[in-house]
Image (cartoon, grey):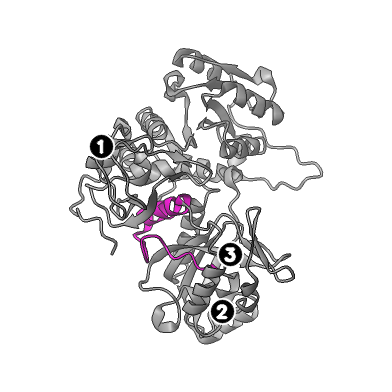
Amino acid sequence: MAAITPEGRVKPHKIGTTLILSHPSRGRTPIRTALTGANGGYGRTFLAQLSRTPEILPAILIDPDIAGVRRMLDELGIPAGRVDEATDAHRTAEIVDDGLTALVSSADAVDWTRVDVLVEACGKVGYGSAYAAAAIEGGAHVVMVSKEVDTVVGPALAARAATKGLSYLPGDGDQPANLLRLIEWVSAVGLDIVAVGKSGEYDLQFNPVTGTVTQAGETVDAPELADLLELGDDVAATLDQRAAAVQNLKRAAAADACEMTVVATRTGTLADIESMRYPVARIDELADIYANRAHGGILEHDGVVDVFSALRLPGEASFAGGVFAVVRTGDTATWETLRNKGHVISKDGRYACIYWPYHYMGVETPLTVHAAMDRTPSRPVRPSILLAARATEDLPTGTQLKVTGHHHEIAGVAPVMIDPARTIAPYYLLDGARLVRPVSKGALIGHADVEDVDAGAHELFFEGTAHLNTTTGVNQ
């Protein structure tokens, strides 16, 4: 735990052989955080980082697996005597007031008056929306890591937070917040944005010696990629051939559409097509690919969000699930100078790609905790796009819909990014729902088609979309 001065401020780190430059945040009053999903992968990366940011205190850790949290804290080297369990809010307050970390299994045991910032990372819409709503009601800022929650109830939670003078921000370290930071930078310097997005979670690594391509440990034969490493003059044709070569690998995921929906609701961007395009692309090709069709690219519109599969050779640097923005260039001489410095510029010089090849999960989230406390201005969250579910097969009455697996997907439906419609159910609200009537292949699932949705999240969704007039759910 951090050393505290008599005035209640964090004492600075002593710097030994490690170079850690002093930072103004180290001198602020300690920030008490509550973390949901504490025993998850994201939770661990955040808690591990807090040992290096002593001004941010893990005041309350929320997870039904208390034993698992204790094991994880032990692995992180946090003494058992620094944590204690609580089953009610009064005991939680006592633990926090004693400068310890309270372990609780549910929101019932949280005293929100002891929390400055909630880091919501449980990933479940019902629980996450309830945690965030309670935190805001109790006067705590919210850092929203659970992108699934944000796509359903983000507009309502953001509006509630604004009304109370609180921050509601996506968490740095995941692609939505990182991409929004990149967009702010691009906009601040005055560049005209054509497309923004990220790479898929895992690169496609092509080995020209064996003619195989590997993604996330799965390897398939794709010898034809050897002749497709250059984009050529017909961009669309090359991309089609590459996609065919790796068709046996799963490249699109609901989590991707979820993350891009978070960005779209804060920027007004749209998906060029409802399922996004997912080109198989090398990094130095992005400015040529995400160009208007009239200029040889693949885009029908400006201002789109998309995801690409990064194609690389063994030994080449990874895009690491990073983020990008494709912009229009200006002065030819300026951008030729930048091309010669290794920046990604389209062949015709019209477009450039600016990218950050990283997302470090909870390692970056302290940035958002500070931003929340500083009430850093953020883009408003508007229901400008809806992440919906389109049936990929005929679904009979009684079908149980459940989000499962690493990619957070629902069997039998595909995530699609469409115009908002109050009659159409958001994708992640369907977790745990049951169909009350059949849904034909190709149809969107509506609110009237399901029962057993989480009541609190359902109410918040409609609260956030109260002003919508659109009812079609058609992609523009």
Gap between marks 1 and 3 measured at Cα:
41 Å
- Which numbered tag is attached to residue 231? 2
Decide whether residue 279 is among the magenta residues.
yes
2 or 1: mark nearer the eye:
1
* Residue 168 in sight: no
Q: Amino acid at mark 1?
A: Val
Gap between marks 2 and 1 measured at Cα:
48 Å
1 or 3: mark nearer the eye:
1
Residue pointed to by mark 3: 310
Q: Amino acid at mark 3?
A: Ala
Quadrant of the frame with the C terminus: bottom left
Residue closest to the eye, 14 or 173: 173
The numbered mark, 3 or 2, whose residue comes first in the sequence reads 2
Q: Give percent across and percent down for residue 326.
A: 48, 70
Element type at mark 1: loop
Q: Is residue 151 left or right of residue 198?
A: left
Q: Amino acid at mark 2?
A: Leu
* Residue 366 in sight: yes
Q: How many marks?
A: 3
Q: Residue sitting at 38 percent across and 27 percent down? A: 138
Q: Is residue 118 left or right of residue 14?
A: left
Q: Residue sitting at 39 percent across and 37 percent down? A: 125
- Specify start and end residues of the magenta stretch as a single range: 254-280
Q: Give percent across and percent down for residue 405.
A: 51, 42
Element type at mark 3: strand
Q: Give percent across and percent down for residue 363.
A: 61, 44
Decide whether residue 432 is among the magenta residues.
no
Element type at mark 2: loop
- Which numbered tag is attached to residue 436? 1
